Amino acid sequence: MNPLKTSGKDARQDGRQEARQDGRPDSAASVSPLAPVPHVSSAPPASPLIERYSEAEVPTDYGTFRLVVYREVAHPDVEHCAIVHGDVRAARDLLVRVHSECFTGEVLHSLKCDCREQLDTGLRAIGARDLGAVIYLRQEGRGIGLGNKIRAYALQEQGADTVDANLRLGFEADARRYHVASAMLADLGVASVAVLTNNPAKVDALRADGVIVTRRVPMDIEPNQHNREYLDTKRDRMGHLIRLRS
Ligand SMILES: [Zn+2]
C-alpha cells in the first residue's frame, strides 16, 4: 500500500514514475545540488494521514492562490493548508516552500525568528511564477506548540539558546515532522519539487517519504538584532545552511 495515499487520489503514482525516468532538474540557476539521500526508516504510517476538506481561491498581496485545506484523519481539528499557484498536477521541479506555522513571527511580527520573512519570501517567489505551492503545516514552535514555545522563550531569557531551551523542557531540538507535507504533495499530484529552504533535514525528510526532490533552493535571510543569535544557532547546531545578508 502506498503509505502516502490520501483519500482516493492515485494520479501521483504515475507522476512519480514519470519523474524518475526524467527526473533531472531543468535549470541550474540559483540551485544547490544535493547528493541523493538514502531512504531511512522514518516511513509514515500506512493509513491515510489527511483528507482534502475544502478549497477556494484567495487573493493576496502576492497574487491569487488556491487554498486547499486538509484535515488530519486522526485529528480532524488539526488543519493544514496548501497555498497553490496554478495547476500543479503532474508538475515537475515545482517550486515549493514547506513551511511550519509561527504565530509569534507571522501574526505578531516577532523579531525573534525568521519565519515570517521565509513565508513572505516563499509566497512572493511562488506568486511570481506560473506554478508553485506553499505547504503550510500547523506545527507551531518547531512542533512543540505555542505554550511550550513561550516556555522555551522564558528559558532563553535566562541565557539558553533555542536548542538547549527545547532540550531542557524535555523536547527534541526540532520536533517537526513532514509526513503530512509529503501526503499533501502526493494528493496534489505533484511529480517532483524544488524545495525553497535552508534546512537540509527537511529535504531529507521529504525524500524519505518518497517525494522526488530535484534540488534545494536557498533563501537569503536578513538578520536583525533580536534574531542574530537564533540564526547562528540554527546554522551551527541544527545544520541549517543559512546565508545571512549583512
Ligand atoms: Zn518563528
Image: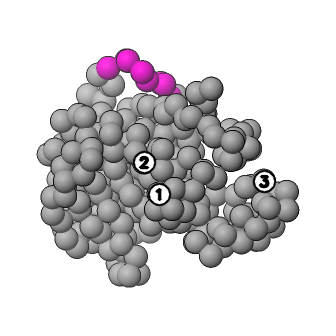
Residue plotted at (33% across, 39% down): 124
- In terms of depth relative to the viewer, which is nearer, 141 or 91? 141
- Amino acid found under the numbered disc labelled 3: Asp
Residue 3, visible in the rendered structure:
no
Residue picked out by circle 1: 106
- Amino acid found under the numbered disc labelled 2: Leu
The colour mode here is: one colour
Numbered disc in front, either 3 or 1: 1
Residue 61 in the image, given as x and y percentages of width and height: 27, 47
In this picture, which residue range is highlighted in magenta?
Answer: 27-34
Contact between labelled residues 2 and 1, with CB atoms less than 8 Å apart: yes
Q: Earlier in the sequence, mark 3 or mark 1?
A: 1
Give SS at disc 1: helix
Residue 129 in the image, given as x and y percentages of width and height: 23, 34
Residue 32 in the image, given as x and y percentages of width and height: 48, 25
Residue plotted at (61% across, 30% down): 244
Q: Is residue 36 left or right of residue 92?
A: right
- In terms of depth relative to the viewer, which is nearer, 22 or 99? 99
Q: Quadrant of the N terminus?
A: bottom left
Q: In the rendered image of this protein, does residue 209 appear above or below residue 86?
A: below
Within 8 Å of ligand 1, the CB of disc 1?
yes
Q: Quadrant of the C terminus?
A: top right
